[in-house]
Amino acid sequence: MLLEVRDLHVEFHTREGVAKAVNGVNYSVDAGETLAVLGESGSGKSVTAQAVMGILDIPPGKISGGEILFQGQDLLKLKEDERRKIRGAKMAMVFQDALSSLNPVVSVGDQLGEMFQVHKGMSRKDSRAKAVELMDRVRIPAAKERVGQYPHQFSGGMRQRIMIAMALALEPELIIADEPTTALDVTVQAQVMDLLAELQRELNMGLILITHDLGVVADVADKIAVMYAGRIVEHAPVHEIYKAPAHPYTRGLLDSIPRLDQKGQELYAIKGLPPNLLAIPPGCAFNPRCPLARDRCRTEEPPLYDVTESPVPRASACHFWKECLHG
Amino acid sequence: MPEQPQPFDDGRAINHTGAGGGTDLAMDEGETLEKTPGGPEGTGPDKKPRSLWSDAWHDLRRNPIFIISGLIILFLVVIAIWPQLIASGNPLDCDLSKAQEGSQPGHPFGFNGQGCDVYTRTVYGARASLQVGVFATLGVTLLGSVLGGLAGFYGGAWDGLLSRITDVFFAIPVILGGLVLLSVVSSNSVWPVIGFMVLLGWPQISRIARGSVITAKQNDYVQAARALGASNNRMLLRHIAPNALAPVIVVATIALGTYISLEATLSFLGVGLKPPTVSWGIDISSAAPYVRNAPQMLLWPSGALAITVLAFIMLGDAVRDALDPKLR
């Protein structure tokens, strides 16, 4: 297994109290596999990724438990210096907003080249040549001429390609893409997603795709982990989840996708708001918003039930998963 | 996905871009490269398109305030280095018999109380004023931005300690501090005065540097650099410092003018520069008692002082306008 997150707990110490952002997350990614992590803002999907990358702001953040095994090695036990050598070289991240994730006063060629200077000790000139190569690889036209240009001179789609090029520069084994297409036009989203998926196949990388867009997920992911209030509430192979969700929250997410055959009808929305992480409801965190909720849900926190029906394992954290799955 | 849709992708870019404004479309047709002349900021061997700095330079060159103040400052710098270019006399060559006399051929500004030529002294006075202004600003900027920058970057206890120290220094009244500290110095060079200004001036820059480093540190690209394996030093020097520099430069340029006038104030009070150093402050101070009989003694050095301070403040203003992206 390339990456295994085991029972990860992350909390943030704020003035108002302790916000429990991640409460016992387990997931794993193998080489060449794509895991989509789905959830609303504040569900802990980005925080989990930051903990894996080791870029969590500590303080106020704190990893209060769990293990992050990367190629069998617990990252949380490594020294900062050793982790830094892994970041960028063996695991890399693609950020949501490429404009703000690129330094406005450094040319893209220099930023791409930085990867080779930092990790491979290359000279500025050699790294410049590598930068052009990378830009070609993510299909930026006229890479040679544009390598000296600054981020604001590129379009949104091109900038995201540059971010992807930076992440892929050293051919890492794992890529974490945090909503890589959210800031893009719909037309460009598909191109960028295809590029990412193609390069992933080519280099046989593990990919963790963090998103709240179910449309993006369907084509590229192998399995899906749905997060809610810092926990994984459903974990399933991608085609099964679309066919029949085993958690009412997943069902709610699927139902809120606009569909052509519903033209004229009101779009479904999950009622209520995501829980305040300073005061997560007792029992099942989703119970105040859940159409299936009953007394048991308000008192007893559901474990992650094994709901496997096919050869691939599947899990749901709902007491009434059977009802959800078959109802 | 084939190459085809990409021009469309690029065309859409105009909506997203902030700083670059309308240059995007033109650039995509490969025009910007010719259009943008390489300013002095274009350091690399390749044709550099616009960055924050070359954009600022582009704006500055078209700003009349910058041109006027720049020419005045250039002139001041030249006569500070080679005063004999426009003044043939010796500022210390005085003739008491001519004391307080008015303008006469060869001595357009008249004579001061000691019978020295006011024109020569005014020209020679530029050197002390500029020395104090430039070196005090350099010292303040270096010390302040290093200390403030580190405090902003590392935060925590070091930041707390430094912030309290800056508070202490802010509490010292400049004039009173000057009277106390400089009155015990007997040297008549410019360095004790510069040292005093650095000592009291760095907290101002330090606060600004700290603030802008904290702002720059929170930028996504710093996080991204970290995620891609950059070390602390690299993040600070390459990603944070260049983006935190603009406010420091602006304040430093404006402060330069105030240091020059502070030198004059301290010299007027008798604790700044001391004769035989020639300085506008000293001359203003010695002219004060004779202002009714010989106004030229006061007028010329204080006029020169006012123009110099004004030029630096105008320059600072122009630089601020050019470096502030919100005004674009």
Image: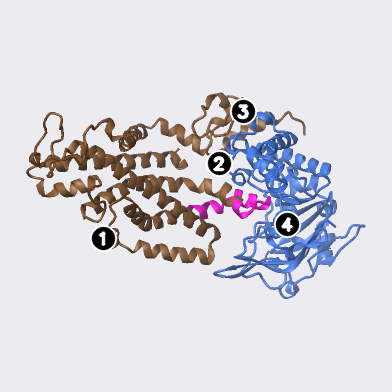
Chain colours: A blue, B brown
Number of the label disc, if any, that sits on residue B28: 3
Q: CA distance from mark 4 to mark 2?
A: 44 Å
| Range shown magenta | B212-233
Q: Kindly indicate whether the residue at mark 4 contacts the one at mark 1 (C-beta within 8 angstroms).
A: no
Chain letter of disc 1 in the image: B
- In the rendered image, residues at marks 2 and 1 fall on the same chain: no
The answer to whether A34 appears left or right of A109 in the picture is right
Number of the label disc, if any, that sits on residue A252: 4
The answer to which of B88 and A30 lies nearer the viewer is: B88
Quadrant of the rendering where the C terminus of chain B is positioned: top left
Q: Earlier in the sequence, mark 4 or mark 2?
A: 2
Of the residues shown, which amino acid type is indicated by label 3?
Asp
Q: CA distance from mark 4 to mark 3?
A: 43 Å
Of the residues shown, which amino acid type is indicated by label 4?
Gly
**Closer to the camera: disc 1 or disc 3?**
1
Disc 4, SS: helix
**Closer to the camera: disc 3 or disc 2?**
2
